Image: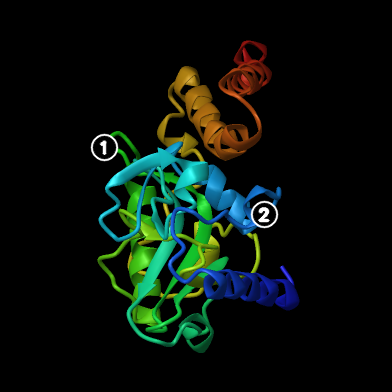
Amino acid sequence: MSHDNALSLSLATSLMANADPLASSTHLPPARFFEDGTALNRLLLEAPYMARCSDDKTATRVRPREYALRYPYMQVNRPGMVSWLVFDLDHANALAWDDAGLPAPNLMVRNRKSGHSQLFYAVPSVCTTENARAKPIQYMKAIYAAFAARLDADVDYHGGPVAKTPGHPWWETTEFHSHVYELGELASAVELTVKPWATGPKLDQVSHSRHCILFEQLRYFAYSIVNRERELGSFESFMRSLDAYAYNHNSFLKQG
């Protein structure tokens, strides 16, 4: 997103706030929430269908996400899934990321009175349920901790349960870009004590079994397409892709 457009979003929310400084659940969200490919649109799509929201941090209400946008605080990550790394800065240096030499956030949401802000980084969804793989979660948490230290952000915040709602007139919102950062991109900007998890099958460990080799190849193929299918496809198209991959790679009979 261009610098001019980023400024225009901030100006628009400023004008709305000046027109109605007490506006909360009555205001209409900015149109960019409904424009494909914008960071604000991704925030809407990745939010829970029924999101917690409120006029304060208690988030005692639950509303459809399109209506939750009208409140100054809302839940931006789905339960058991992290699609946004949100950093809470209890200081007035909203450009701390630039001073620290870190990548630019997608969104910056700033308190007009205190100058405190929250920085939103879009990442591919990481499952955090008890059945999820531990290593991606550990990797993400290590990145979060390293960024929080460089930003002088609250290390215990972790984006929730609610965040300042981007685009709400209570806040000054700046949209910088719509890029979704791979965790490795963010990790390259900081020093980590946790190494990234394996990105490919370890076939040497299962070379004794043809079935295990195919399973290892298939599961890593599934990891590589699941986010795309979740966003653009369906469970049925996901399964068709897996079936086709398994069929095309099941060549063991030809190998004797």
Toward which corner of the image does residue 115 lie, by quadrant? bottom left
Q: CA distance from mark 2 to mark 1?
A: 37 Å
Does residue 225 lie above or below 152 as drawn?
above
**Which residue is depicted at the point 32% across and 57% down?**
160
* Amino acid of disc 1: Glu
Q: Count the marks: how many?
A: 2
Label 2 close to label 1 by CB (< 8 Å)? no
**First in sequence: mark 2 vs mark 1:** 2
Numbered disc 2: secondary structure: helix
Q: Is residue 27 left or right of residue 114?
A: right
Q: Could you say where residue 167 lies in the image, as x and y percent from the top left?
A: 55, 63
x, y percent for residue 2: 74, 73
Question: Viewed as shown, does residue 96 lie left or right of 11?
Answer: left
* Residue occupied by mark 2: 31
SS at circle 1: loop
Q: Whole-percent x and y of residue 173?
A: 55, 70
The image's mark for residue 212 is none
Depth check, front residue: 113 or 229? 113
Amino acid type shown at disc 2: Ala
Residue displayed at 61% across by 74% down: 15
Q: Position of residue 151 (x, y in %)?
A: 40, 80
**Alpha-carbon neighbours of circle 2 within 10 Å: few (<14), some, or many (≥20)?**
few
Q: Which mark is residue 130?
A: 1
Residue at the (40%, 87%) spot, across then down = 92
Q: Residue at x 53, y 58 (%)?
A: 122
